[in-house]
Image: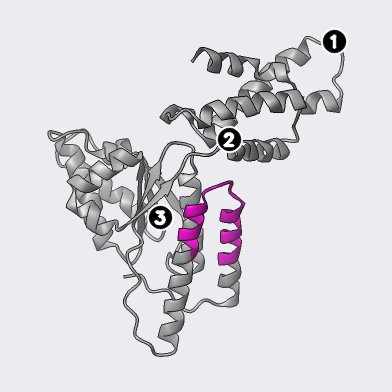
Amino acid sequence: DFEAPAVDVDSAESVATALAQLDSIVGLKGVKTYVKQLVAQIQLNAQRREVGMKTSPDSSLHMVFVGNPGTGKTTVARILARVLKAMGLLRLGHLVEVDRSALVAGYAGQTAIKTRQLVESALGGLLFVDEAYAIVSDERDHFGKEALDTLIKCTEDYRDDLVVILAGYSEEMRRLSASNPGVKSRFPTTIEFTDYTAEELMQITDGVLEDEQLEVTPEARNALSKIYAVMSHTPSRENGNGRAVRNLLERAKREQALRLMAIEGKKTKEQLMLLVEDDFSGAVAELGSA
């Protein structure tokens, strides 16, 4: 099982940098708290061992991330891989992201080989299995069962050199865990990624706008507030959360491009930077007809 070595100054700075990255993400209060608790627990256990105290092995780091798309699961997994590398728990700290199609082969006997090869590519790092509930489609899905069984066996075989995260929708992941004792026993921790509030969606928007040197008029901001209010009060997997914000702004930029190209001459910096209410009218109209 994982046992962290004592953390030196450089490692401590790397851990602090990765945790600062985590803190910079909008929302996810519960997720941030769990990761910080995990780090603190591992560090204290290392210090206990240094002074000759007995410690139980650090608990399994394999975990389940549940939540809708766009809630930050992959981003947090990437940061977690960096944290665990900085703490000496992972050799490489890279992230390998896969789904059912990467694990399941089309011929008998090939799935276990394919799954094991993928797992081996993730050794020293973190294997992130998105939409993990889809690995086994139904009772007759022998290839899917072979992939899941192989994956679970690998979590045991490589338990000192690999962290696996299974991710997906809450309800489907709970069903997967309930129907497969291996998932339940080897993935003891479930972390929930809640949907963003309207205020958090606006914070994400402001971050993207700043990164891209864009601004919105007060009227456009008001239109965005209305869009996010509807999105956050509409329980739907299709809302997309943070992903929806980026898609919305990409669409607004296309509308802006059309609008500006209809104006003759060279555009001013202010014109190039500014998104106006009309640039969001298509998205507003779609929400109104939904």
Disc 3/disc 2 C-alpha distance (Å) = 32 Å
Q: Residue at x 33, y 68 (%)?
A: 59
Residue at disc 2, secondary structure? helix
Kindly identify the residue that appears in the image at 65 percent across and 20 percent down. 280
* Marking on residue 126: 3
Q: Residue at x 20, y 39 (%)?
A: 144
Q: Secondary structure at mark 1?
A: loop
Numbered label attached to residue 264: 1
Q: CA distance from mark 2 to mark 1?
A: 37 Å
Please tell me how many numbered marks the rendered image carries: 3
Disc number at residue 198?
2
Instruction: Determine whether 269 is above or below 49 in the image.
Output: above
Q: Please provide the residue range marked out in magenta.
A: 15-36
In the image, 198 versus 116, the foreground residue is 198
Residue 247 visible to the viewer: no
Mark 3 residue element: strand
Residue 286 seen anywhere in this rendered image of the structure: yes
Badge 3: residue crowd in 10 Å (few <14, some 14–19, many ≥20): many
Horizontal side, residue 267 vs residue 113: left or right: right
On the image, the x and y values in percent for residue 172 come to 29, 38
